[in-house]
Amino acid sequence: MKVTAILLAAGQGTRMKSQLPKVLHPILGQPMIWHALEAVRQAANETPVVVVGHGAEKVTDYLGDSARTVVQDPQLGTAHAVMQAAPLLRGTGGLVLVCYADMPLLRGETLARLVETQKRNSGPFSMLTVFNDDPRGFGRIVRGPNGTVQAIVEEYVATEEQKKIRELNVGAYCFNGDWLWDALNRIEKNPHKGEYYLTDAVEVAVKTGLAVQAEVMEDAREAIGVNTRVHLAEVEAEMRKRVNEMHMLNGVTLIDPVSTYIEVGVKIGRDTVIWPNTYLHGKTEIGEENVIGPNTIIRDSKIGNRCKILASVMEGAWLEDDVDMGPFARLRKGAHLGKHVHMGNFGEVKDSYLHDGVKMGHFSYIGNADIGAETNIGAGTITCNYDGEKKHFTTIGEDVFIGSDTMLVAPLTLGDGARTGAGAVVTKDVPADTLVAGVPARAIRKLERAKRRNA
């Protein structure tokens, strides 16, 4: 059966006190509306429709071709918002799933159960409800003797007796599409608010003797909506817990889940251990049997297997297997560390490839460089890659030994087996198996490969 989702995202969100549309505020690295779209895609099989209003251009630009958008202007209530989708959906049949874009904790499987409930319902629609001692301003559900929903009573008009009702309206509905569009035309303007509310669809159905069914949510936390920054933090904390639990159930050890931040979309292999105060962002992929943290930040990076990263920062970097780095190491965009590379504390690498087995001492900077396998980079080494106008490249061969405090003034090439003395300032290419030293560095002698290896 055709199921089309309508997401309501037109509200201004004034209590957020923000220039950014409410539904674009991020939760674990993705806008709020992204989470809502992911959920409805698990329950619907047609391209969703998003009703936009405040900040419509920004929301539409973000959505791109992931959804169809319609504009609600002026904004005259939730029933009026749904009506804006009528030109796209009227006459197409099937079911119409309606929910809010500011409820990012609502799970796809919960919405799928709602859809299944309506498929079994002979009446015009079904709705999600939840039992909760804290009403959070939600309308109360009044049921009839046969268990069907007879009314939704909003809190501002509820009697003291009605306020004791613990079953609440979540704000997610699944309608028979053919019935919905005619019913919306029969909803009257609310005399207190001057708007048209989708909750009044219950009254339209009941007056004609039709059954409205309710699917009770199992987890009340899914019903948390976002209206303020306080709610945003509450939802973020719940989403973090949900994501962290997923990784732990998949074989990842989180020493302290409360102090570990993992964004949605991050991939982590089993038997990896994450220590406290670690932040994993964006499109990060981490293999198996790694030890990450504590106090580590990783964004949009790829990490192989059996790596150890202590108190370090990575952004747009790639570590192959068995890399050891930190503490206080930094990998910037384009850094690539091969297998068994060691990177000491207070080192920095940018836009460079350190091939297998490279040892990079502490307090060093490598930028715009290619470092050959088994090369040793002494402490305090700097590739001087910027001349004030342009970046220049440094190429270092295999099995090279760079002495402490060496300045490599790019563009520069050092051949296989070359050596620099401590404190050298290298401004010219160094042939293979040659020792240079001094300021500026000059060739001291030719090295015999066998002797040098035994030194």
Image: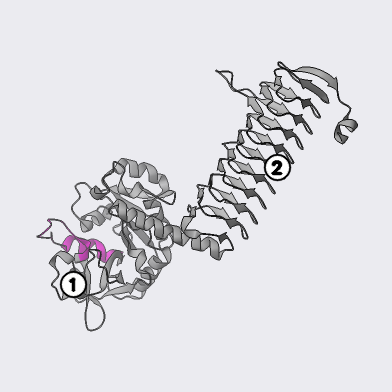
- Determine whether the residue tagged by mark 2 lies in a helix, strand or loop: loop
Q: Is residue 296 visible?
A: yes
Q: Which residue was labeled with disc 1?
A: 163
Which of pointers 2 and 1 indicates the residue nearer the eye?
2
| Residue 94: % across, % down | 35, 64
Image quarter where the C terminus lies is: top right
Residue appearing at x 36%, y 76% in the figure: 120
Asked if residue 357 is positioned above or below residue 266 in the image, the reply reads above
Dot 2 amino acid type: Val
Q: Which residue was labeled with disc 2?
A: 341
| Residue 178: % across, % down | 28, 64
Left or right: where does residue 90 sit relative to residue 67? left
Checking the image for residue 240, the label placed there is none
| Residue 352: % across, % down | 64, 33
Dot 1 amino acid type: Lys
Q: State the residue in front, 343 or 53.
A: 343
Left or right: where does residue 55 sit relative to residue 383? left
Q: Is residue 431 visible?
A: no
Q: Which stretch appears magenta?
A: 177-199
